[in-house]
Image (cartoon, helix red, strand yellow):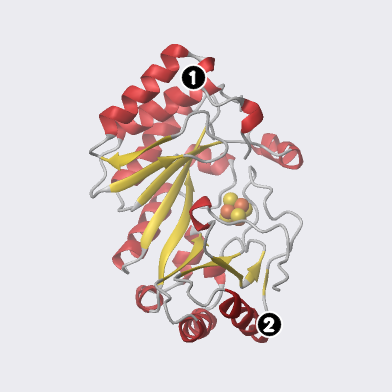
Amino acid sequence: MLEYDYPLFRPPAEANNVILQVTLGCSYNRCSFCSMYKTKSYQAKNMDEIKRDIETLAYSYPDATKVFLADGDALALPSEQLFTILKYLDEKFPKLRRVSTYASTQNLTEKSNKELEELCKSKLNLIYYGVETGSDVVLKKITKGVNQSEIIETLNKASHAGMKISATVILGIGGEKYSSLHVEESAKVINATTVTYLSTLQLGLEENAKENFYKHFEDFTMPNDEQLLHEQKNFLELLEPKSKTIFRSNHASNALHLKGNLPKDRDRLVDELAEAIHVGKSAFIPEMFRGF
Ligand code: SF4
């Protein structure tokens, strides 16, 4: 039985896949809205321990085809270590098709094009990437440590290397004041890149993140559900993805669950949002059934 270091986070889409912890925490850990890894200091796990974990997982799930590398940004590991891990995974899971991880702009900047291509060929072929917002004003206020052009550049770098990207935009992250800017600039990022999966979730601030968040974002006021659905509708209306993009808004935080393929289903999704806004609160998922 594998002993994980908690808290342990993984994307909803990885719920049925093997989770292998190769790092602990997040190498950046300074986004003001995020409290996921505040109880952990970033560190790489020891390679012998990782290999033992792979053996244990392979024994329990010999037919697994997909493995998610945790924690917050396993792509922060030096490429040589990642290659060792990927090679061992391939040896121990004969049916392995996909390895995925969370990845940041910083991680992707540090890797060369060649390294990303080789990682992708070694089956690390899906990254989960928190765009959060495309607005430079908002990115600064949430202390994301990157700007819009760096986000576009690194997303394109990953997709040119052959990696699939699952990108997330956070509804409400600009507050009421920067809502339009957030939506317009986030759509610009998606339209300038090639993402395979796109999801929107609603901002939820944990108690232990609030003080730091408001310190950097003094003029922030939290939009209500209706405003967030308007934001989402405006965002969808501005999207012109370069290729087919699978859109999901089914995170536990969302007031309304949506799914479809863009651009094909955009009008239907916009209509569903308009209908929910028209009906009001009774059309939204009750808050008691939601979480962040
Ligand atoms: S949002 Fe992602 S990059 Fe930022 S601190 Fe949280 S885990 Fe790290």
Q: Badge 1 is on which residue?
A: 283
Q: CA distance from mark 1 to mark 2?
A: 48 Å
In the picture shown, does residue 288 fall above or below 142?
above
Disc 2 element = helix
Identify the image quadrant of the N terminus. bottom right
Amino acid on which the number 2 mark rests in the picture = Glu
Out of 62 and 122, give the one closest to the viewer: 62
Residue at the spot of label 2: 49
Q: Quadrant of residue 6?
A: bottom right
Percent x, y of residue 18? 55, 67
Q: Amino acid at mark 1?
A: Ala
In-front residue for pair 32/149: 32
Q: Residue at x 23, y 50 (%)?
A: 243
Residue 238 appears anywhere in the view:
yes
Location of residue 180 in the rendering, given as x and y in whole percent from the top left corner: 42, 27
Q: Is residue 282 left or right of residue 156?
A: right
Q: Rate crowding at label 1 as few (under 14), some (14 to 19) or many (20 or more) other CA atoms within 10 Å.
A: some
Residue 32 as seen in the image, left or right of residue 5: left
Q: Would residue 219 be seen by someone viewing this image from the given angle? A: no
Q: Pick the quarter of the image with the C terminus.
A: top right
Residue 10 position within the rendered picture, expressed as x and y whole percent measured from the top left: 57, 57
* Residue depicted at 49% across the width and 19% down the height: 283
Towards the viewer: 139 or 61:
61
Does the CB distance between marks 1 and 2 fall below 8 Å?
Answer: no
Residue 132, horizontal then vertical, whole percent? 49, 44
Near mark 2 (Cα within 10 A), the count class, few <14, some 14-19 or many ≥20, is few
Query: With respect to residue 229, does 46 lie above or below?
Result: below
Q: Ligand 1: does it lie within 8 Å of the C-beta at label 1?
A: no
